[in-house]
Amino acid sequence: MKYIIGNWKMNGSKDMAWKLSLDLHQFLAANTNVQAKMVICPPFPYLPVTHDFLARHDSKLGLGGQDCSDKESGAFTGDISATMLHDAGCEYVIVGHSERRQYHQEADSLIAQKIVAGQKSGLNVVLCIGETKDQREAGKTMAILSTQLKGCLIAGIDSKKLIVAYEPVWAIGTGLNATGDDIVTAHAHIKKELTSILGQGGQAIAILYGGSVKASNAKEILSAPGVDGVLVGGASLKADEFTAIYQAA
Ligand code: PEP
């Protein structure tokens, strides 16, 4: 089964969240032949309106948070715990997104603790990794992916509640996307590392691609060997684009 996960980032409104949930839910209800899991990750304040809608309609659309704290509760102003996300109806949480790494200086050691916290709360964790443009041009892509995986996947992590998203930083929100060959090579490398770090369980972990995925390139990306789905930013804000990506699965 492929995953089609939408990361709304810091976009939307209460009305938009309701309308987009309605459009996506209606699409899924009318297209039960597609064997793929669609998940949306709205900003925190819009989780209740989205969850209420999905629960009331017994929807197949999954819900996720865009980040969580590594802490359980307490004096951490502005943070949201994984338990709160679960309580709000989420089944998934994204951690280690390059925008969190870049604008909030999140290091692999912190992301590792967020994975532990997310899984402990019953969430499926989507771990984002990827190289910057400079790292790519210096020929360091595979080394960076290995370092990020080794730093984030510490003892106690449950491979059954883990999804990895390969998101080259230079491809996020830029309109540029990695070539099919780049994606296949990176995903094969990630699979090898996951198996070496987590053993047999690592083999079965879904590996998604993210970075300027849209309706026009989704089919090519989703049919590349080793691609178990896509993490979509900008194009997940429009029902017609996002459902066309889903259909490509
Ligand atoms: C993302 O935010 O994870 C992402 C891949 O963004 P975009 O699709 O806009 O490049």
Image (tube, rainbow, N blue to C red):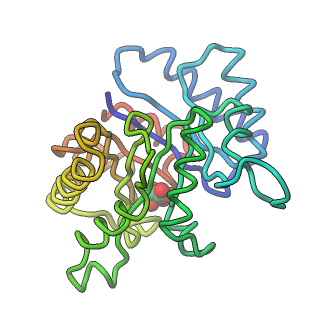
Residue at 42% across, 41% down: 162
Q: Is residue 236 left or right of residue 228?
A: right
Seen from the viewer's position, the closer of residues 41 and 158 is 158
Total tally of numbered discs in the picture: 0
Q: Position of residue 149 (x, y in %)?
A: 35, 60
Q: Where is residue 180, by image quadrant?
A: bottom left
The C terminus: image quadrant: top left
The N terminus: image quadrant: top left
Q: Is residue 62 above or below residue 73?
A: above
Q: Is residue 5 left or right of residue 213?
A: right
Seen from the viewer's position, the closer of residues 23 and 100 is 100
Q: Is residue 143 above or below residue 1?
A: below
Residue at 74% across, 39% down: 84
Q: Position of residue 136 (x, y in %)?
A: 27, 78
Q: Position of residue 130 (x, y in %)?
A: 36, 66
Q: Is residue 192 above or below residue 131?
A: above
Q: Is residue 202 above or below residue 88?
A: below
Q: Where is residue 62, by image quadrant?
A: top right
Q: Position of residue 119 (x, y in %)?
A: 54, 39
Residue at 32% across, 49% down: 216
Seen from the viewer's position, the closer of residues 173 and 95 is 95
Q: Where is residue 58, by image quadrant?
A: top right
Q: Is residue 42 left or right of residue 175?
A: right
Q: Is residue 80 left or right of residue 163?
A: right
Taking the view exactly as shown, the residue that stands out farthest to the front is 155
Residue at 73% across, 31% down: 87
